[in-house]
Every structure is written in structure tokens, then in C-alpha cells.
Image (cartoon, rainbow, N blue to C red):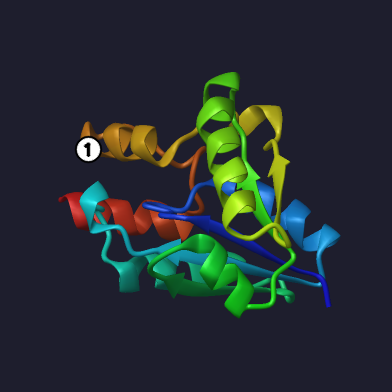
Amino acid sequence: MRTAIYPGSFDPLTNGHLDVLERASKLFDRVIVAIALNESKNPLFTLDERLALMKSGIARMKNVKADVFEGLLVEYAAKQKAQAIVRGLRAVSDFEFEFQMALMNRKLDQKIETIFMMPKETYTFISSRIVKEIARLGGDVSPFVPPHVETALKKKLK
């Protein structure tokens, strides 16, 4: 069974994330969305909230499941018997950081490959950080996130 890990903080889940996930789910038998416990990022949503939002977002994708992890990504991937890590690239500016991480992960465990996927052009400018800023300022985030995430953002920021 070909398994891929799609890691991130997903604070919050965006349509760009879902686009990458849908395409990854066609390439792998099983895709695990690994939501990172990284409190140094000061997430808006708790880990449990992010997990619940993700589970709602992926409900229709039969070979995708959501989980949480802490620690080294390659150790988590090995524990899940994954062959690949999927990373989204929105712009050239993402590449340098992602390239360094991919090389480091390969150094830590050469059996796990990193696969870079680009979202549809309509999502290349979307980031969780920008979505949160728009929501904080009262802007319309409906083009950028699924409806359940838009509702959660409004509730969290009122």
C-alpha cells in the first residue's frame, strides 16, 4: 500500500490544502494529513479544533485520514509506513525552505521521498496566515476556505 503523509499546521484548513489533498489522494492508496503540534506558531485554533475542521474537510475523500503528530516528521512517517511526504508549493518563495526540509528529511531517513505538488493557480496566493488576517479584519474569506472553516473563523474571532 502506497502511503503519503501531508504534514502542516492547517491553522486553518484552506481550499489550497484541499486541492493538494485531492490530487495526492489520486496518486497514493492512503494519505494521512498529519497536523503538527507546534505551539511556537501560536495557532488560532487548538489542535483538537484543527483536527475536527480537517476531518470535516476530508470526509468525502475515502482514502484520506487525519491525525496529529509531535516530533520529527520522518519518524512519524516511518511509524505510519509511509513512502512519501507531500508538500505544497505555492510560489518560488516556498521552494528554498521546502527544498532544505526535503534534503534534511532525506538525510534523516533516505527511504522516505518528498513529493512537491502545486495547487491550482486560483489557490497559489492563499495561505492560512493571510486567511486569518482577512478574517480578523472582517473580510470575506469564503473564496479561500470551505464553509465550515469560514463559520469556525467567524465564531473564533467575534
Secondary-structure class at tag 1: helix
What residue appears at the point 71 percent right and 34 percent down from the top-left corner?
120
Q: Residue furthest left?
A: 158
What residue appears at the point 77 percent right and 52 percent down from the top-left corner?
23
Residue 146 visible in the snapshot: yes
Q: Residue furthest top?
A: 92
What residue appears at the point 74 percent right and 65 percent down from the top-left corner?
83
Residue closest to the eye, 30 or 145: 30
Which of the 4 quarters of the picture holds residue 127?
A: top left
Residue closest to the eye, 80 or 109: 109
Residue closest to the eye, 91 or 52: 91
Up the image or down, 7 lies above or below 116; here it is below
Picture coordinates of residue 138, whole percent (x, y): 24, 35
Point out the image quarter for the N terminus.
bottom right
Which of the 4 quarters of the picture holds residue 148?
A: bottom left
Picture coordinates of residue 13, whole percent (x, y): 46, 53
Picture coordinates of residue 66, whole percent (x, y): 54, 73
| Circle 1 Cα neighbour tier, 10 Å, few/some/many (<14 / 14–19 / ≥20) | some
Residue closest to the eye, 109 or 151: 109
Q: For the residue marked with disc 1, what is the amino acid? A: Arg
Query: Would you name the residue on which mark 1 appears?
Result: 136
Residue 56 visible in the snapshot: no
Up the image or down, 79 lies above or below 97; here it is below
Up the image or down, 124 lies above or below 142; here it is above
Horizontally, is 157 left or right of 108 in the view?
Answer: left
What residue appears at the point 33 percent right and 64 percent down from the top-left corner?
37
